[in-house]
Image (spheres, rainbow, N blue to C red):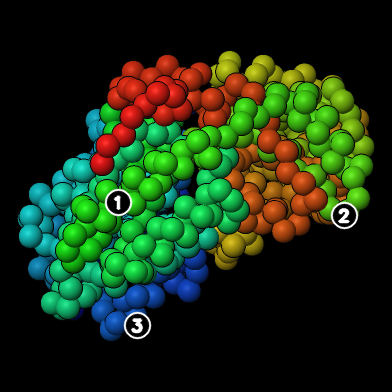
Amino acid sequence: MKILFGMLVHESNSFASGAGDFKGISVGEELFSIYRNKVGYLAGMIKAAEEYGVDLIPSIAAGNAGPRLTREAVEYAVGKLVTIAEKRKGEYTGICLALHGAGVAENADDLEAYILEQVREVVGPDMPITVSLDLHGNISPELAKLSNGLFGCKQYPHIDEAEAGYLAMKTLIRILRGEAISQTAVIQLPWLVDARMGNTFVEPMKSVTDYVADYAAKHGLIDAAFFHGYGYSDVPFVGASVVVVAETGAHEAAAEIARHIWEKRELLKGPAAPMPDVAVDHALAALEKPGTGYVVIVEVSDNPGAGGPGTGTHLLREVLRRNPKKAIFGFICDPEIALVAHEVGVGGEVSGLLGGKTDKIHGTPIELRNARVCALSDGNATYVSPMMEGLPVCYGKTARLRVGNVDIVVTEQTGAAYDDRPFLITGADINQYGIVCIKGTNHFRAFFDPRAKAVVATDPPGVTSKNFSSFNYQKICRPIYPIDLDTNFSA
C-alpha cells in the first residue's frame, strides 16, 4: 500500500497589504529529511505510516501566513501537487494532506476546498482523502464533502500538530484496509473567537477543550475538534466551528458539542487590550513585584504569525520614548536598516527610518540617529520552541541596534518570535533583560510562559487587532458575535 502525502498551509489575512505567496517550498524526498522525527503535521503522518507499514509518496510542502494569496502563487503550488498526483497516479490508493483552513486567494475564497477539487480532478470522487487542519481554520461544509475526514489540532499554542497529522494518516490507513468507515460533520458557529482567549492550557478555554476531548472519548468518535476560526479572512464562512469524524452519528455529536460551546461565548469574550503607553506602565509595575524573570510585552495587532507585516512601530515608538533600563525589542522587520547595519559593521552607527514602511495602519517610520550596531547575524537558527523544535528558520540578515537603553533586533525577513532564537543569534540573552517586547498572540507562550515573570498585551491599530469591529468586512455573514452581541445560534 502506498499513500501520497504533502502540505500546503497558508493563513491568509484579507486586510494585510501586499501580495501573498507560499514560502519555504520543499518538494519530493526533501519532506522526509526535513520532517521525519521532528514536529508538525508531516512528522505525524510519516510516523503513522512507518508504524503501520505503509509506503509514502512525497509531494510538496509549504507553510506560512501573509496577505491573500495571488492566483499565480496558488497555481504554482497547487500545480506542483497536482502534477505529482497525476504522474504517480496508479501507485497510491489514498491521499493524506496537511492544509490550514484559513487559506484565501484571488481565485478562491476557500483555498482548501479548491485544492481538494483540483486533486479530485485527477483521482476522482472515490479515492479516500484525509486532511489535517489548523485550529484556526474557517471550516466550510464543502471541504468536508470533498474529504473522508478532517482532523484539527486541538491545542493553542499548536504543540500537537504531529498528533493531528498522525490521526489523519492512521484513519486513512484504516479506511483503506477496510477497518473503518467515516462520516464528517461541520457545524459552523456565528462567532469570531478572540485569539487572546484561545490559550487551551489555561481557563476558560481549557475547560472547553477538555469537554470536547471527553465527549469524543465517551461517545467513541474517531475525532472531534473545536476550531476557533480565523477572523481576518473576509469570507462568508468565517468563524468558529465544530468538526466531528465518526462512523455514525457525526452530525448529532457535532451539534451537541456546538450547543455546549456556544453557551460559553461570554466567558471567552476577551477584554480590550491597552494601548502601548498603558502596556508599558503595566510592564514596569510588574517588574517591581516580587519574583524573578523578565516581563513580556506582546504587540498582538502586528502578529506575523497571523499575516501581520512585522513592521509595525506603535509599541517600539513608546518603548523608545520611555527608554526603560534593560529593555529589548525583538524583532522588527526592515530589510533596508538590516542591510545598512551589516555594511557599517559591529561598532558602527546607523541612521535612517526604521519600520512603518509597509502601510499606514501599523504606524509611521521611526527616525534612527546614530543607533549603535551591537551585533550582526546571518539569521540562521533552529527552533527550540515546543511548537517547532528542531526545524530550521532563517530571519535573513539580522542586527541588534542600541538606542538609549533599548536594544532593537532588526531582521531582513518577517516572522514571529516563537522562542529566544531571534535574540540569541545576536548574542542577546533575554534573561539579562527586564522587558522583552515581541509581536504575536499566543504561540509565543509555548516558550515564554514558563520563563516570563508576567505577560502584558497591547493592541494598537493593526491587521491582527482583536477589535474585530475595526475591520471593513465585505463578505462575512451578519449577525456574528461579538460584533453583534445579540447574535443567535441554532445547531
Q: Residue 444, percent across and down? A: 63, 49
Residue that label 3 marks: 51
Decide: is 130 above or below 17: below
Crowding at dot 2, Cα within 10 Å, few <14 / some 14-19 / many 20+, comes out as few
Q: Amino acid at mark 1?
A: Glu
Q: Residue 90, percent across and down? A: 10, 68
Left or right of 333? Residue 132 is left
Left or right of 95? Residue 383 is right
Residues at marks 1 and 2, CA–CA distance in whole angstroms: 45 Å
Decide: is 118 above or below 338: below
Decide: is 216 above or below 490: below
Between 465 and 44, which is closer to the camera in this rendering?
Answer: 465
Question: Splitting the image into 4 quarters, where does residue 179 fall?
Answer: bottom left
Left or right of 180? Residue 239 is right
Between 258 and 24, which is closer to the camera in this rendering?
Answer: 258
Sequence order check, earlier mark of 3 and 1:
3
Residues at marks 3 and 1, CA–CA distance in whole angstroms: 34 Å
Sequence order check, earlier mark of 2 and 3:
3
At 54% from the left and 25% from the top, the residue drawn is 467
Left or right of 234? Residue 314 is right
Residue that label 2 marks: 292
- The circle drawn on residue 25 is none
At 33% from the left and 38% from the top, the residue drawn is 189
Mark 2 vs mark 3: in front: 2
Marks 1 & 2, CB-CB < 8 Å contact? no
At 53% from the left and 45% from the top, the residue drawn is 198
Q: Residue 418, percent across and down? A: 62, 50
- Quarter of the image with the N terminus in it: bottom left
What element does badge 1 sit on?
helix
- The circle drawn on residue 256 is 1
